[in-house]
């Protein structure tokens, strides 16, 4: 439920409403609306049944939230959220790019790619140290060594680090090195993991599950947020359909759906979304044109030799070409007032 205060409501009116909510054993969160304050009520709203909230001074009306997720819903938080990852803002209108290899393979490989992506304008270096591979015989990642290499690349370039956490046991370790924790598609409904990253407070990049609906995805975000961590960014990375030409079917319409249903920023990963490097450029442009807050793209200095996801990895030249286009496209959208 959200309680919408009228524009003339005093601080005392707001405090009284919060106190009535808390006395009923629920939690309250105050948000600034464009004209007025909104109080979000967290918990089982039937506990408020005996409290005449709508009759309290300063209250304009109370509105029930119809969705199973609340904190992630736009009903609860009408304004777009901007997530600050150690100074880099996601969702403030400029496209944030996260780029790098699928997996951290060696220090040399990582540093070379980090320089390339930094030069092109990316703000985050991505790279898996723990890789959730479909086959147990595929390269599983360098684990802690990989994290150490990410740290060195961060120190050399100033790029922020986003890297995947696959098991709860690795949380303390990964949190020491990562600026943002990535929850991969295969773990989107690993509720134990979602709750733990919710408790740790680090910004989270939550990828869409391979076969998850938008509703299930936003409920996964709710698991993180309900533990007190509202620093969640969503990442559309394609879903399973009957189409086999592409690795996944990139659901660009999910950007518009999420923007309508939620206040959380959303970025798009056209690399995993298509599985083909040639399709990354047009899908990256489509993502930005659709209102996405950024992109995640895989880049490798030698895709043919990559230990994972070579076919979808961009060479430095292709990456730079896409970044030039993204700059022009986002500049055009801004100048023409095409952003929301
Ligand atoms: C990745 O980003 O490296 C990755 C494994 O992606 P996803 O979880 O979307 O498959
Ligand atoms: Mn990959």
Image (tube, rainbow, N blue to C red):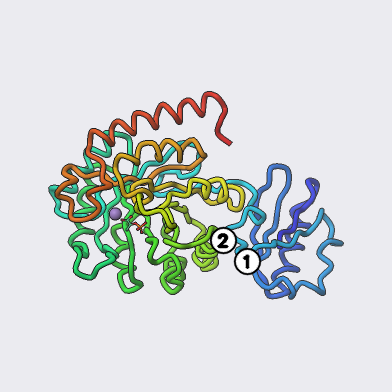
Residue 331: x and y in percent read 46, 27
Q: Residue at x 26, y 63 (%)?
A: 130
Residue 159: x and y in percent read 30, 44
Give the residue at mark 1: 68
Please indicate, yes or no, whether residue 167 appears anywhere in the rendered image: yes
- Position of 127 with respect to 273 (left or right) is left
Residue 30: x and y in percent read 66, 56
- Position of 179 with respect to 101 (left or right) is right
Residue situated in front as seen by the camera: 298 or 304: 304
Q: Earlier in the sequence, mark 1 or mark 2?
A: 1
Q: Residue at x 20, y 51 (%)?
A: 152
The quarter of the picture where residue 218 lies is bottom right
Give the residue at mark 2: 215
- Position of 186 with respect to 72 (left or right) is left
Pointer 1: residues within 10 angstroms few (<14), some, or many (20+)?
Answer: few
* Label 2 CB-ligand 1 distance < 8 A: no
C-alpha gap between disc 1 and disc 2:
9 Å
Give the answer, above or below, for where 53 lies relative to 235: below
Q: Are marks 1 and 2 in contact (CB under 8 Å)?
A: yes
């Amino acid at each position: 439920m959200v309680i919408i205060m009228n524009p003339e409501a005093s601080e005392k009116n707001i405090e009284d409403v919060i106190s009535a909510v808390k006395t009923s054993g629920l939690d309250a969160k105050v948000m600034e609306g464009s004209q007025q304050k909104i109080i979000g009520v967290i918990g089982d709203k039937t506990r408020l049944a005996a409290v005449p909230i709508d009759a309290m001074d300063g209250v304009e009306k109370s509105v029930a939230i119809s969705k199973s997720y609340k904190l992630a819903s736009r009903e609860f938080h009408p304004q777009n959220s901007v997530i600050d990852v150690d100074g880099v803002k996601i969702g403030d209108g400029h496209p944030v790019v996260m780029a790098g290899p699928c997996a951290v393979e060696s220090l040399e490989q990582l540093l070379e790619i980090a320089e390339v992506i930094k030069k092109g304008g990316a703000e985050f270096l991505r790279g898996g140290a723990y890789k959730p591979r479909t086959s147990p015989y595929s390269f599983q990642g360098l684990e802690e060594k990989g994290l150490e290499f990410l740290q060195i690349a961060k120190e050399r370039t100033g790029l922020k680090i986003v890297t995947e956490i696959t098991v709860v046991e690795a949380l303390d370790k990964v949190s020491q090195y990562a600026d943002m924790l990535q929850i991969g598609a295969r773990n989107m409904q690993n509720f134990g993991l979602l709750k733990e990253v919710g408790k740790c407070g680090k910004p989270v990049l939550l990828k869409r599950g391979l076969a998850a609906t938008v509703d299930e995805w936003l409920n996964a975000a709710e698991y993180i947020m309900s533990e007190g961590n509202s620093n969640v960014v969503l990442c559309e990375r394609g879903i399973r359909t009957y189409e086999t030409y592409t690795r996944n079917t990139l659901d660009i319409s999910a950007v518009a759906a999420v923007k309508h249903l939620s206040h959380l920023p959303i970025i798009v990963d056209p690399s995993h979304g298509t599985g083909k490097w040639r399709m990354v450029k047009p899908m990256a442009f489509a993502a930005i044109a659709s209102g996405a807050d950024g992109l995640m793209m895989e880049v490798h200095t030698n895709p043919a030799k990559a230990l994972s996801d070579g076919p979808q990895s961009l060479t430095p030249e292709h990456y730079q070409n896409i970044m030039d286009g993204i700059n022009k496209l986002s500049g055009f959208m801004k100048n023409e007032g095409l952003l929301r």
